[in-house]
Amino acid sequence: MPLGPLRPSPLVEQAAQRLRDQISGGAWPVGTRLPGETTLAKELGVGRSTVREALRALAGAGLVQARQGAGVFVIATEPAEDWPARLRRASVAEVYEIREMLEVRAAELAAERRTSGDLADLDRALAARDAALDGPAVEGFIDADIALHTAVIAAAHNPVLADLFAGFVPVLRDGLLDLAALVDVRASDAAHGRAAHAALVEAIRAQDPAAASDVVRAELGRTLTGLLQSR
C-alpha cells in the first residue's frame, strides 16, 4: 500500500496519521524496521523534519521506538492507553487494590511527618465525615470519606503520592456512587468505619506509623474483600 503525497494542512499530524495507518493496517508488523527518514519524507512529500516530528509522536503513543544506530522499529500496532483512560476502565475493586497499597504507606508517612496544620485538617475532615454519616445523602458521605483520606495523603507530604491519589479520586468516587445505587453502603455497618477512621486520626496524632498503617490496611482490606466477593 503506497503512502502517497500529503495534502496541505498540519503536515506533522497528517504524516503521523499516515504512518499510524500503515502500522495498524499491517504494512509494518511489530518488529519491523521503518524506512529511513529520507525515504519516508520522499514518499510522503514532506521534509525530513516533519517526518522526524511524526515519528516522535508515534513514539509517544507507544507505537515505535528508536534504537541507537539501528533505526526506528514498530513495537505495537495500537496506541498505548494513557493513564486517565486506563483508570476509567478500571473496576472499583482494581482501584481499591492500588489504593490500599498507596494509603497504607501514606498513613505511615503521615504519622511521621504530620504538622499541627495537618492535624487541624484531619480533625475537620473527620468531623465532616461524622456529620455526613448522619445525613440522608450517600453522595455527601462518600465525598466526606474521600476528603478525609485525601487529608491523610496530604499529611504524608509527598507531592507525587498526592498526585497519584488525586488521579484515583474521580474513578473511585464514580465507582462508589455506582455501588451505592445498588446497595446501601452504610447498611452493613451502622457506623461505617467511624471508630476506625477516628483511630486513624489518633494514630497520626500520636505519631505511631504502625498503628496508622494497621488501621488503613484493615479498613480498606475489609471493603476490598467485599468488592471482590461481589464480583
Image: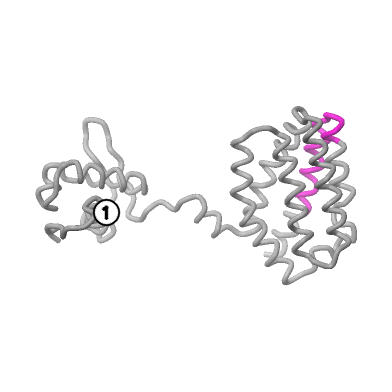
x and y percent of residue 195 in the render?
Answer: 90, 48
x and y percent of residue 60 in the render?
Answer: 36, 45
Is residue 205 located in the magenta-colored stretch of the structure?
A: yes
Q: Residue at x 73, y 52 (%)?
A: 146
Quadrant of the rendered structure where residue 171 is? Answer: bottom right
Mostly what secondary structure, the magenta segment? helix
Q: Residue at x 78, y 52 (%)?
A: 222
Q: Secondary structure at mark 1?
A: helix
Q: Residue furthest bottom?
A: 182
Q: Is residue 105 above or below residue 131?
A: above
- Name the residue nearer the viewer: 156 or 125: 125
Label 1, on which residue?
A: 13
Three-letter code for the amino acid on which mark 1 is drawn: Glu
Q: Is residue 141 above or below residue 68?
A: below
Q: Residue at x 75, y 58 (%)?
A: 142
Q: Quadrant of the N terminus?
A: bottom left
Q: Which residues are magenta?
A: 203-222
